[in-house]
Amino acid sequence: MKKRLALALGICALVVFSYLSSRAADERRTLKRAIEEIVTGDLFFDDGSDFSYGVIMETPYEAAGLLIDNLHTVDTLWILNNNDREKPKETWRVINSLYALGVITGGKRFTSSTDYVFPEPTFVYVPFGDSPAEYRKFWLTRKGRDKMPFYAVWPSRGSIYIAPKDVQEKVIRKWKDWYKKEGKTYNYRLLRGDFDFTDKEILD
């Protein structure tokens, strides 16, 4: 009798374990799909209300880890007018991953100083003219050379300017350090309103 009971309990435990494992795997796949939609789609200017963000906020710690795994340095200097559908895919993934991290953390954004020397300005304003190198310096350094973000946006045009490599490396390292030290206990919350066009960011 005891052997039968033990066998029955063992079978029940195995069934429960299999069910929980399958459910966890399904949830993981759903989370990965939601993140993939965000980092590859046109959700860069989303306000956090999209369905994918709802999925992410069910397990924000795990989502943040996956988004941080997407981060790496890029060679792209700028993406102009946000209408270049031939933009480098990996660069777009990184930018969208950083944007999503800002959205799910209530506006957290890491910045850094740089040793990069920008070219001397020769800027003369021409309506709808094209001086991307100088616009890049202006938008990236508008809060100072010691608080440079990974990327900056010219709001009225949707142009994106990307920081020098040393800033990129430091920002990525700060995200990884933050995740290791605070990721599990952080008070994740969606930032409503476009992240790049507000003053709600939490600079660190």
Image (cartoon, helix red, strand yellow):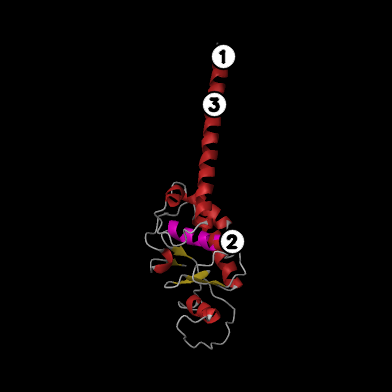
The amino acid type of the residue labelled 2 equals Lys
* Distance between mark 1 and mark 2 Cα atoms: 58 Å
Question: Which of the two residues, 8 or 103, is positioned nearer the viewer here?
Answer: 103
Q: Residue at x 57, y 76 (%)?
A: 114
Give the mark nearer the N terminus: 1 vs 3: 1
- Whether residue 149 is visible to the viewer of this picture, yes or no, is no
Task: Give residue 4's mark.
Answer: 1
Determine crowd level at label 3: few under 14, some 14-19, many 20+ residues with C-alpha closer than 10 A: few
What predominant SS class does the magenta segment belong to? helix
Question: Which of the two residues, 118 or 38, is positioned nearer the viewer here?
Answer: 38
Of helix, strand and loop, which one carries label 2? helix
- The residues colored magenta run 93-105
The amino acid type of the residue labelled 3 equals Val
Relative vertical location of residue 29 with respect to residue 8 in this rendering, above or below: below
- Whether residue 94 is visible to the viewer of this picture, yes or no, is yes
Residue corresponding to mark 2: 89
Q: Residue at x 52, y 59 (%)?
A: 97
Q: Quadrant of the N terminus?
A: top right
Residue corresponding to mark 3: 15
The amino acid type of the residue labelled 1 equals Arg
Labels in figure, total: 3
At which x and y percent is residue 41? 51, 57
Residue 180, image quadrant? bottom right
* Distance between mark 3 and mark 2 Cα atoms: 43 Å
* Distance between mark 1 and mark 3 Cα atoms: 16 Å
Viewer-nearest of discs 1 and 3:
3
Give the mark nearer the N terminus: 3 vs 2: 3
Relative vertical location of residue 79 with respect to residue 134 in this rendering, above or below: above
